[in-house]
Amino acid sequence: MDTVLVIGGGATGAGVARDLAMRGVDVTLVERGDFASGTSGRSHGLLHSGARYVPGDPEGAAECIAENRVLKEIAPHCLSDTAGLFVQVAGDDPDFFEEKRAACEQLGIETEELSAADAREAVPDLAEGVERALRVPDAVIHPTRLTVANAVDAREHGATLLPRTEVADLIIEDGAVRGALVEDGSGEFEIRAEYVVNATGAWAGTLASMADIDLEMAPSSGVMVAVEYADLDTVLNRARPAADGDIVVPHDEQVILGTTSVDVEDPDEFERDDAEIDRMFAECGAMLSGLDRERIDRVYWGVRPLYSADRERHAGRGISRGFHLLDHAERDGIGGFASIVGGKLTTYRAMAEATSDRVCKRLGVDSACSTAEEPLLGRDEPGRIDGLVAEFEADNPADSDVIAR
Ligand SMILES: Cc1cc2nc3c(=O)[nH]c(=O)nc-3n(C[C@H](O)[C@H](O)[C@H](O)COP(=O)(O)OP(=O)(O)OC[C@H]3O[C@@H](n4cnc5c(N)ncnc54)[C@H](O)[C@@H]3O)c2cc1C
């Protein structure tokens, strides 16, 4: 019998598989598509410094800066350490800028104020209206690399990886989840487990319903537009309350403009409105000049795995939303089953640690988490990672342009 079945091969599920496998637990990871083909590989790819979330959410910001520092140590081969600027544009409230800087300083998030001239020296193509900027330790994540590195690291610690394998139903016995019925294209089979982790992100409600558990997600879609543009090498954030199109993420030869926030019913079927693309050019163009619609390489939408409790608590997309570990034995009286929902790509490792701590407690495994210290697979041989991505044929829009094929 497999000890733990992890469902969902995004960053979170792959992170849980790695964490548990490193603690000596037998794990099987199943993913219905390719690794990171859900939200992880369709995100904006900002490794948050936490600056975006202050002053409103100091806890969420503290979580981000802690994970930002950990990932820069353990996974530099899955990141580009570009730093970031919050830019104040003519008409933006200068008090917002000051409050952000003060709140960053309070939390120990390093900042440096740049005059308009200094900011332009750092980024010659800043739009004309930029009045000043605040440098923060943001960076860029390449989520397909990150997810595959976690999955293969889990495999090197004994885990079984099953991409393109979809859970069709959960096996329930004596009031507990004991595995799943899966389909892999060649047919259906059972995977039995002592414990099952639901790491299916925006799809977590559908998965939980297979155990008759009511888990209401509040998925929200956002557009990203990848445009050819070689001259930006730092993240740009707009220094104003969160709104559409206020982040530009640099890649080697492109920039990724984003994003929007639209509530959706179904994370697979939702309206993709071209007007959102126009908004990206208008809003991001207030920070960066020379964006050209003719040079769009790809447009993609992702769906945030928000938990409904967060939607009720926080209206507004800029607000950090922490993650939620739902132990269904406590919450719903169904044993052997937990769901991990909400959170961010930036905090995937902390989400995996919290989940694995709970699973180990339930299984009586006495072994501590080491993922904050142990380098992620491939760190010391960065050329290896894209070969592994190719092995799994993972090809996702968030980083398809940077992965060597
Ligand atoms: C527009 C947008 C922009 C974002 N930008 C950022 C950002 O810049 N920085 C940041 O930190 N975060 C960002 N996020 C948030 C971040 O992308 C997500 O929080 C994170 O990627 C979620 O990872 P996950 O592993 O939990 O979910 P996912 O990556 O969605 O993984 C869940 C997986 O479960 C699989 N699955 C579902 N059902 C089944 C089943 N029945 N059987 C098997 N597998 C199944 C899915 O295929 C999917 O791959 C953004 C999100 C969006 C939508």
Image (cartoon, helix red, strand yellow):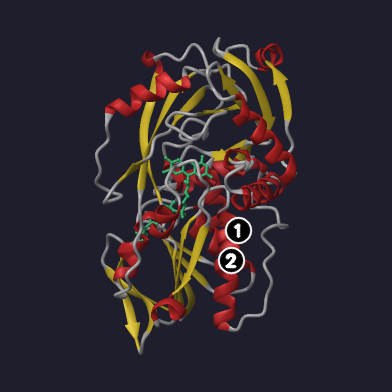
Q: Please give the name of the residue rendered at 62% of the width and 80% of the height, measured from the top-left corner.
A: 365
Mark 1: which secondary structure?
helix
Q: Which mark, by number, is residue 179?
A: none
Residue 71 appearing in the image: yes
Would residue 372 appear left or right of 156 to someone viewing this image?
right
The image position of residue 207, as x and y in percent, is 33, 66
Which residue, given by chain and number where applicable, does mark 2 sit on?
354
Q: Are marks 1 and 2 in contact (CB under 8 Å)?
A: yes
Residue 345, image x, y percentages? 53, 48
Asked where in the image residue 273 lies, by quadrant, the reply is: top left
**285 to 28, vertically: above or below:** above
- Disc 2 residue type (three-letter): Ala
Q: Is residue 335 above or below residue 119?
A: below
Residue 65 place in picture, x, y as percent:
67, 46
Establish if 207 lies above or below 146: below
Between 160 and 168, which is closer to the camera in this rendering? 168
Q: Is residue 155 visible?
A: no
Few, some or many C-alpha atoms within 10 Å of disc 2 (few <14, some 14-19, many ≥20)?
A: some
Number of other residues with Cα within 10 Å of mark 1, as a class: few under 14, some 14 to 19, many 20 or more: many
| Residue shown at the point (33%, 29%) measured from the top left | 276
Residue 85: percent from left, percent from top: 63, 27
Q: Nearer the viewer, residue 371 or 148?
A: 371
Q: Is residue 38 above or below residue 26?
A: above
Q: Residue at x 44, y 31 (%)?
A: 258
- Write down the residue under mark 1: 350
Beta carbon at label 2 within 8 Å of ligand 1: no
Residue at image coords 34%, 86%: 173
Which structural element holds mark 2? helix
Between the C-alphas of marks 1 and 2, the distance is 6 Å
Amino acid type at circle 1 is: Ala
